[in-house]
Amino acid sequence: NAGVMQNPRHLVRRRGQEARLRCSPMKGHSHVYWYRQLPEEGLKFMVYLQKENIIDESGMPKERFSAEFPKEGPSILRIQQVVRGDSAAYFCASSSTGGENIQYFGAGTRLSVL
Amino acid sequence: AQSVTQPDIHITVSEGASLELRCNYSYGATPYLFWYVQSPGQGLQLLLKYFSGDTLVQGIKGFEAEFKRSQSSFNLRKPSVHWSDAAEYFCAVGESDTGRRALTFGSGTRLQVQP
């Protein structure tokens, strides 16, 4: 019974490159959330998706960041033209469709921008 | 908008001593409340949650937390700390009356356990 799977665990990019972070939710879960954790800080909500739909993107930066959760395959968080300030740990969580919003987290992707 | 405050950035306790980590929240209604633990380089593991009902909730690894509406608090406790409890602990709040599913996290409390 696999949990939330994120890959890669570590990602190094140079300024201006693109970063793609992948997240496969727990089996049976149809809700995916992305959070960002800057050094020495708590997690900040970025986006909430269901299959083929973005439900809440109130925490997403307006430029360079996008997310998708296609009908088939993992959810993708995409960061275009990365800058040093994008260096952070990016966590994905998933939950079931039920009323209780219990989110289970993956191990995260640690992005370093050189 | 809701907010979460964890007043203690860093706490050190001796192994076998009791522990209480503080969490205060700001929210108009009764929120959903969570405690997560993060070991170095790892993801977050859910320790316990409160949605409604009994205000004292039991979690994994011997942790418990008590919801106190009058104090807007949800403090985490453990009667006897083990060295393996050294980690960072996050309190989080979810909205119970809007349908919005984003969680708001505190800035965390780092627990160090002395032998």
Image (cartoon, rainbow, N blue to C red):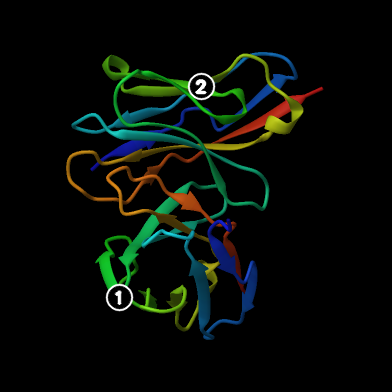
Q: Looking at the rendering, which quadrant does residue B24 occupy?
A: top left
Quarter of the image with the C terminus of chain A is bottom right
Q: Looking at the rendering, which quadrant does residue A1 occupy?
A: bottom right
Residue at image position (63%, 73%) is A11
Determine if residue A28 is in view.
Answer: yes
Numbered circle sitting on residue B64: 2
Numbered circle sitting on residue A52: 1
What residue type is disc 2 on?
A: Glu
Q: Marks 2 and 1, how far apart in space?
A: 38 Å
Q: Return the chain for callout 2.
A: B
Q: Nearer the viewer, residue A2 or A19?
A: A2
Where residue B33 sits: x, y (%)?
37, 33
Bin the neighbour count of mark 1 within 10 Å (Cα to Cα): few under 14, some 14-19, many 20 and up.
few
Q: Nearer the viewer, residue A30 or B69?
A: A30
As drawn, A22 above or below B71: below
Residue at image position (17%, 45%) is B98
Question: Outermost residue toward the right?
Answer: B115
Total labels: the figure holds 2
Disc 2 on helix, strand or loop? strand
Q: In this view, does B33 lie to the left or right of B111?
A: left
Q: Return the chain for callout 1.
A: A
Residue at image position (61%, 82%) is A14
Q: In this view, does A111 lie to the left or right of A30?
A: right
Q: Looking at the rendering, which quadrant does residue B11 occupy?
A: top right
